[in-house]
Image: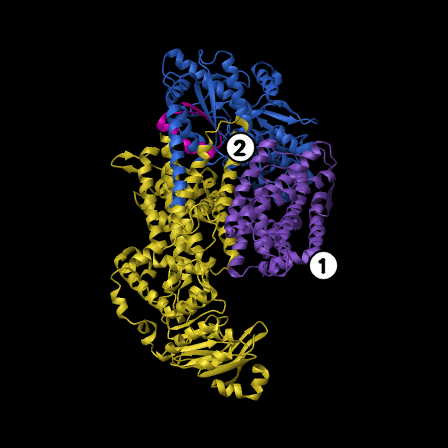
Chain colours: A purple, B yellow, C blue
Amino acid sequence: MDLFLQLFFNGLTNGSYYALLGVGFGLIFATTKIVHFAYGPIFACAAYAAWWAASLGVPLPLAGVFAVAVAAVLGVASFLVIYRPIQVRGAPGLVALIASLGLFILLENLLGIVFGAGNKVIENVNYDVFFLGPVFFTSIHLWQIASLAILGGALFLFLRYTRFGKAIVAMTDNREMAEIIGIDTTRMAIAVFAIGSALSAVPAVLILLKDGATTHMGFQAVFMAFVTVVVGGIGSIRGAVVGGFALGLVQSLGLWKIPTEWQSSIAFVVLFLILVARPQGLFGASRL
Amino acid sequence: MEYLLHIAVMVCLYSILATSFNLLIGFAGLFALSQAAFYGLGAYTTAILLVDVGLPFPLPLIASAVVGAGVGTLLALPALRIVGDYLVVVTLAFQIILVEVAMNWTGLTGGTDGISGVPNYQVFGLSLDSPTSFLPVALLVAALCFWIAWRLATSPFGRSLRAMRENESAAVSVGKNVVAMKLVVFAFSAGLAAVAGSLFARYFNYVGADSFLIEETIYILAMVILGGAGNLVGSVLGAAILVILPELLKFIALPVDIADKSRLVLYGLVMVAILIYRPQGLLGERKTQARTRASSGPGGGEAAAVPLRASAGAAARGRTIEGRGLAKQFGGIVAISSLDIRLEPGTITGLIGPNGAGKTTAFNLLTGFLKPTGGEVLLDGSSTGALKPYELARAGVARSFQDLRLFTKMTVLENVLVALPGQVGDSVFSVYFRPAAVRRDEAANVRRAREVLAFVGLEEQLHETAENLSYAEEKLLVVARLLATGADVLLFDEPLSGLDGATLQEIFPVMRRLAESGKTVCIIEHNLDVIKELCSVVYYLDEGHAMAVGRPEELMADPELAERYFR
Amino acid sequence: MKTLLRPLAAAVMSVALVGGLAAGASAQDNPKSYKIGAILAMSGKANWYGKVMSQAIEQAVDEINAAGGIDGVPLEAVIEDHKSGVAKEGVAAMNRLIDLHDVQAVLTSFSPPTLAIAPIADEKGIFLLNGGGVSSALIGASKYLFHNRSLASDLGRAAATRAHELGAKRMAQLAWKSDAGESVIKAVEPYWTGTLGGEIVATESMEVGATNIDTQMAKIRASKPDVLGLWLFSPDPGLAIKRAREFGMKMPIIGIEYNDQIAKLAGKYAAGYEYTSDYFTPAEGGWAKKFADGYEKRYGEQPEFYAANYYEGTYVIAELMRRAKAKGIPIKGDKLAELLRENPVFDSVYGGKMTFQDNGVAKKRVALFKVDDAGKGVFQHYIEVK
């Protein structure tokens, strides 16, 4: 039972990590219809940016802010330089996806060239370790959950109650209609790339603190974000959150009795079975 | 020189993978992410059969293809019930699970060590153990695989695949069994990828799970998109570029510590640049003009002798379709309740009523696109409850869609061709083993399609892509496509809305002739002038059932209806 | 048609270009230099290995050339990339090395590419020396394949011996989900439960380079072990040590690798970690110290285990080339292998001599190290595996 509780808690923390990644990725995907795979290396760039700033002696919170800025700038730049020209030419969505893979390879290796090989760790970070009964966790774990609650909630409120946010939602629902009623979809897309990428910087910094950064950390991140979004339902923050937790919990609790050598496929076996039983997906897409 | 030949072998392998993947993605529009899994399946099958069982050539190769195709079909069975983006996840899941199984099932696959020492091909005592000696085999197999893919893609079956890609429900409405088509294309795609895997095992003599990861699927996907989805030659080109480019980049001298990463940066840059410059891929989707034009050349006299009226309807069997007590609920919402409707041969029936009255739902029930929650549909007195929509279409009940659902990326001629019933080339067996019959049938079909198009006045636009047509032309093409099915019961969902008076005057005679030839015609229409002009019976639908039935003048004279609808 | 021709023309031109370069490069009968190939992880997940290995090779080549090369002919290293263990990349690299550079000896790394190039080595008679890959499947993969590294399975058994010394009975093991990790499990399990009479209470796997191992740690903690064996390689032991200690596990942790990367990741938790390794500390002086000083001067960091092996491997190949020249036989891979078997004793950067056994593996002494509070591995004693 102790193990179950611990695994449950692990599932929650991983789930909130996946969910936050999914929220950012899903926002971009739902609004612009671009499968932005380069979300992964931008996530990695954010972690490296924070590491670089911190190693120059910048206080950690400021380094985090710097990481957010770097991610937002890279996200917007990838839209303006790559995706927009492709979309303007009326290419199908797959093309943007492949271009984003090209960008993925480019950025990941650029990181390797600039920062060299090996793990980047912020030394002498101290964070608290807690024991709640049999369950162990650290303050980073708590931050993972808190960041989802704060940022996810803020985004939810932003999309629901601000003019700008409503325009984004309108574009998510129907791009053509949004254009007809006078929404500047390019501006919205830029905003969405900025917000979505900025969101990814937060879990990136937390992972840097928890496990260190590597140039290839982006693949797993964008991969899980992608699966989270598809499981939860595209175009829905709530869906991404539910999808993220579902994925995190399945991955963690699934290994309660099953050997860990099956770790990377356990979530997919469950997904496979669920989707075969419920072909329309776990949750339909809904607004917000 | 061996190095160059090695690259050539790799181009062969990836050509097979990219062309087979293109069948799924570019032609069938099925976004599956498991190509590398089938590649690996083929490699492991060959390796295990050679090393553990010792089967002689060509059994392992055949076994690979069969296992690949078989597992592909098995995967497709549940996966195809899954809609849209979820297919991506299911196939992705399959990809990851398969690799994990290969890593963990040590007894069979050697686990993380993989399988070493797969024997080389032996030809007349010569061991094909170098790129030089292996290349002819690779070329031969790649050419064969390309031919198989090409034959499939350019056949009428391939045309049906593209129609399904463009619009699945429209493909169903012209009588295509899309489930069977998906299974077949999955089997072909997976089987061919497994053949590439078999070559892999023979060439590298070593099979390990690391070679078949999701990254490999993405790599192959990039080849397809770069070359151009829906263009098989493009896939070969895409494979060649993505294999050769990194090798070329090796010749740029760079400092050792950053050399290979810099090359990958350049590689990514080139990929992005190509796609910005040519978003449709290097080669766009191929138009099939040349072939269809050739086959419609001289020698078409036989068809000219058959008057259009014959092909479009003289053979009409005079069929009656009837809905009895039809009901349909979506969740708690009642769309149709106790609807009785009867469509007679030789008449044009009109369906009118306010928006949301259930007119389109009624069509969906009659054509089997929706199953009623109550009541039944009878075709000439026998229930159609067990028939799937495509079967009903083949049985002679066809419909159009309010939102047209044309096969937009296909030509006008293809849009009609695809709808012709009973095509020999829709059978995969015939495509490969009765090519002459397919060719003959195709030539006849092209003639029929041209007649149908001439009938609606689109003969000038034969080779125009559907998406380039004007709105009126699109409407005409919808009519032509529906006629081409040869169905006896024709249900038109707002075929005339948005057309100007002159065009209407052209279409009215078409409709009347259809009825005169014995067809059963029903149209949903809002324009009462059109109803008066064409229909002999009108059903007024409101709140899910027929509030009134009668001749148009009768209904319009009804004061209550006038109040509710006609004003 | 124009659109079709353009890429086609580009393709033809590029093939011609490759052909031209290939022809130019292979025309060397009386070489201006002897070339050694190396197929390493220069990009991808494990590019850290490629970095240290290639650095050490370059250092060795420069040193050898400064001392007059191979009887006056300079040595040259050609570094190729297998993208962190992709078999087909290894084969492409091997073909390139043979074809474009006429290489006769290749330093290889990682199991999958090494297994995939082994048949080519057999066919073309190319000498292979592996200082990184540790899978047992590598043994005998090619008659020209040698290893100047202790197999991970030997290190694992030594680690188990140490755990036994500490009086542990219940071992939990965390291993890489790779041939390297699994070969340790395969070696340790029978030894621990059989010869040493212990019990395995948990066997967990982790992906190479995985960052999230909370599940594994939770399961290990729940199994209440009295020793934790880490059958992991750089940098993952660092993360595992840190996570285990954070999880409140106090039992001894014993592994088979330690270096700067691991130290950085483990941080303050590294202290007390014990590991078995065949790398001697340069403090002993001699060649080891000379190598370490040179390396630090060139690259600004301490060399470690993998650097040492590839540095040493380069010297082994240079020595074989010298022997061939002395005997007047042509420098061909198969001849180099024959010469090695004739006299399998070489100087080792680890101190003293090393001897290649019949199975192609160089036998080195295995020692136990313990990490002190400053994060340095301190030599304890040699370990004899029962």
Residue at the spot 47% in from the left edge and 72% down from the top edge: B496
Q: Is residue C105 in the magenta section?
A: yes
Mark 1: few/some/many CA within 10 Å (<14, 14-19, 20+): few
Residue at the spot 53% in from the left edge and 44% down from the top edge: A101
Q: In which image quadrant can residue C224 be found?
A: top right
Labels 2 and 1 touching (C-beta < 8 A): no
B70 vs B529, nearest the viewer: B529
* Magenta stretch bounds: C102-129
Placement of C119 over or under A280, stated as above or below: above
Is residue C345 rendered to the left or right of residue B424? right
Badge 1 amino acid: Tyr
Q: In which image quadrant can residue B302 be found?
A: bottom left
Marks 2/1 same chain? no
Is residue A142 rendered to the left or right of residue C30? right
Placement of B224 over or under C253, stated as above or below: below
Find disc 1 in the rendering and name its residue.
A161
The disc at residue B262 is: 2
- Locate residue C253, reporting x and y percent: 63, 34
- Locate residue B480, reporting x and y percent: 39, 68
